[in-house]
Image (cartoon, rainbow, N blue to C red):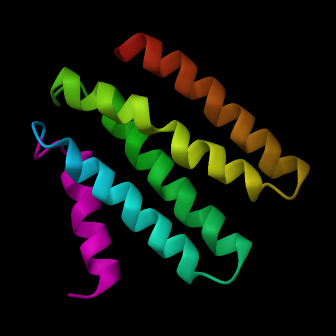
Amino acid sequence: MNKELAFGTLELTIRHGLQPDNPHTLYHYLDMLEERLAAENTDKVKRAILKRVLNTLLDTICDTSISFHWRYLCLDNIYKPLNQVEKFDCTDGQRAETRRFKYELSLLGTYFL
């Protein structure tokens, strides 16, 4: 199976909480993220991939139709890509965007969990 297709399929499983009793699904998704980052050559592409994962996890955290423990697991693990994206913040605008995301995460995480 194509790696991009496998990543996208796993991403949908994460986003919709299709395997809420299988935390290894989320861990596998984060491992696949690491593989994709290692395969990329440009920081711009790496940052885009990290932002995609961050948005997927944040959307999952805020979706009350998904089980609480799955959303909480996503919250517990969102720091991994969040810490990585900061390494690729090259401009003031990118740093501001990351700060806004952290602020949004702190508000929404508190509200939805």
Q: What residue appears at the point 17 percent right and 31 percent down from the top-left corner?
A: 66
Q: In the rendered view, tell whether residue 79 sits above or below residue 2.
A: above
**72 is higher (above) or lower (below) than 7:** above
Q: Quadrant of the N terminus?
A: bottom left
Kindly indicate the quadrant of the structure image that contains residue 30: bottom left
Residue 37 shown left or right of residue 24 in the figure = right
Residue at (90% x, 48% y) in the render: 92
Depth order, front residue of 66/2: 2
For the point 28% across and 48% down, which residue is it?
Answer: 26
Principal secondary structure, stretch drawn in magenta: helix
Q: Quadrant of residue 79?
A: top right
Instruction: Point out residue 86 in the picture as x, y percentages from the top left corner.
Output: 73, 48
How many discs appear? 0
Q: Nearer the viewer, residue 4 or 38?
A: 38
* Residue 76 at x, y percent in the picture: 41, 29
> In the orientation shown, which residue stands out farthest toward the bottom?
2
- Res 45 quadrant in image: bottom right
Q: Is residue 41 left or right of residue 33?
A: right
Question: Can you give x and y, in whole percent of width and height, for residue 61 in the image?
Answer: 35, 30
| Residue 9 within the segment the image draws in magenta | yes
Task: Find out whether residue 65 is within the magenta segment.
Answer: no
| Percent of width and height locating residue 22 | 13, 43
Figure quadrant of the C terminus = top left
From what the image shows, is residue 39 above or below residue 74? Answer: below
Please give left or right for residue 48 compared with residue 35 in the image: right
**Magenta residues (range):** 1-19
Q: Residue at 27% across / 79% down in the picture? A: 5
